[in-house]
Amino acid sequence: MHTIIEDACTGCELCLPVCPIDCIHLDNVSDNHTGWQAWSQELADQAKDRYAQKQMRMASLLQQDPKNEISSAAKQSAVKAALAKAKALTER
């Protein structure tokens, strides 16, 4: 299963070199604008909110597991939950 979470995509292109099957194509949505000119205030605010949410998740995980030693079973469980959620979304 390959997918891009469009709401979370910032267009940074970091996913391109690591894609195992080279299936990602990015559309140019900012015309000829690059750098800071390509970002609207709304997009910048959304990216800032996603970053803050990630920081809170990471802090919560660190509190739960100070040594940052998440078990293999916990990782597998998280992946299974994410796959189930993705499958449920595609079946709608």
Image (cartoon, rainbow, N blue to C red):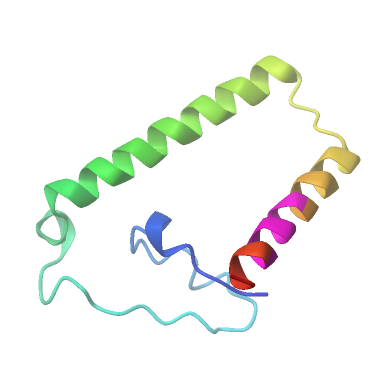
38 versus 26 height, above or below: above
Residue 84 belongs to the span the image colors magenta: yes
The residue lying toward the viewer, choosing from 11 and 89, is: 89
Residue, x 67% and y 63% (percent of image)? 88
66 versus 16 height, above or below: above
The residue lying toward the viewer, choosing from 82 and 62, is: 82
The residue lying toward the viewer, choosing from 17 and 21, is: 21
19 versus 52 height, above or below: below
When asked about the image quadrant of residue 47, the answer is: top left
Q: Does 30 sit left or right of 84 as displayed?
A: left
Q: Residue furthest right?
A: 73
- The secondary structure that most of the magenta stretch takes on is helix
Residue, x 40% and y 37% (percent of image)? 51
Q: Position of residue 29 (x, y in %)?
A: 21, 73
Residue 25 belongs to the span the image colors magenta: no
Residue bounds of the magenta highlight: 81-87
Residue, x 40% and y 67% (percent of image)? 13
Q: Position of residue 65 (x, y in %)?
A: 75, 20
Identify the image quadrant of the C terminus: bottom right
Q: Position of residue 15 (x, y in %)?
A: 50, 66
Q: Does 23 sit left or right of 37 as displayed?
A: right
